[in-house]
Image (cartoon, grey):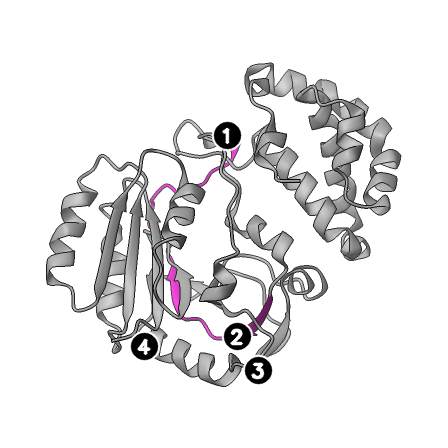
Amino acid sequence: MSIFLSVITPTYNRRHTLHRVWESLNRQRQDNFEWIVIDDGSTDGTEGLLNDWKANARFHVHYSQIGRMGRNAAVNVGRTKISGQFVTLMDSDDAFLDNAFEKIAQNVQEHLSDSSPAHGIAFPYHDEKGNRVCAEFPAEVLQCSHLEARFAHRIRGELLTVYRRNAYDNVQHIELPLPDHLPPSLAHIRLNHTFVYIDTALSCKFRHDGEDRITSDRRRVKKNSVNLKSPRVRYIKSVESLNYCIDYFFSNPGLFWKNAMDLIALGLYFGIPISDQFRDMASWKVRMLCALAFPAGIAKFPILFFRHGRTDRKWNPRLAINF
């Protein structure tokens, strides 16, 4: 039997919440899918639990364990193991709604024909109380690029995205030394794939269960496992956002101005020569904006030093970016 959908789940010490994904998969009417679980070095008995489930599953279950390398590394490993025609991700503490796969198949048939330019379909999440997690879509069905959705239509927040396999083969998440973590959405900025946005929730994101989320800001980095706001993360986000999104400057000038200031200040923080910073900028638009923001970036540099000290300067973030 051919595999229609591959579901990738990266996990780390989520034995107590993985049952949400497992149970939601068992409630699907179809069985022409596979579940690929990439364990990022769990120490809570996740391996034994997955082996028990695998022995009794009516669908394909693939389990692999890697050393502690972070979520993005786990997803990159999962990408190499897919065999389905389409691919989606489900976090280890969330779940699909009943009949989600049936509705995915219906929408694929309707919107992802061989002649369609779309690379996949995106659906909103609801939380366990039925509240919407992402911003409202401007229409029930909308086809546009990732950046157009983000900046022109202001579709932000987490989405359940179903990719064509050949499109997902090109999705490579940047891996950083832990505890730093880049949001998965950053991988789509360079590719700027076209998606069909369907305003129907097919999955649940648990936000009111009292659990610590896998991602955190710097104030909670000691309690959680990764950090979304370290200097390294902010530098890479600034470079990527400016180089690939600058054409949408007028949709959110404040955001681009902040990114330009951060790029200058963080570049100085990491000891990156100004000439190298400007060489990394992909267009004259980015160079002009950063030149205007240069004095503000210089002024921001001491604040970074006061806040972070020298600790985060040991590893140059440019090493993670393939310019």
Q: Considering the numbered disc 2 on the image, is that residue within a helix, a strand or a loop?
A: loop
Using residue 219 as the reference point, say whether residue 63 is left or right of it. left
Q: Which mark is residue 99?
A: 4
| Lower position in the chain sequence, tag 1 or tag 2 | 2
Using residue 145 as the reference point, say whether residue 199 is left or right of it. left
Q: Residues within 10 Å of mark 3 (few under 14, many from 20)?
A: few
**For the stretch drawn in magenta, what is the main secondary structure?**
loop
Q: Considering the numbered disc 3 on the image, is that residue within a helix, a strand or a loop?
A: loop
Magenta residues?
A: 194-218
Q: Considering the numbered disc 4 on the image, is that residue within a helix, a strand or a loop?
A: loop
Residue type at the position of mark 1: Arg
| Lower position in the chain sequence, tag 4 or tag 2 | 4
Q: Residue 211 magenta-drawn? A: yes
Task: Please identify the quarter of the rendering in which residue 29 is found.
Answer: bottom left
| Image marks 4 and 1: residues in contact by CB distance under 8 Å | no
Residue type at the position of mark 4: Asn
Q: Nearer the viewer, mark 3 or mark 1?
A: 3
Q: Which mark is residue 219?
A: 1
Mark 3 lies on residue: 115
Label 4, label 1: how far apart the Cα atoms are: 39 Å
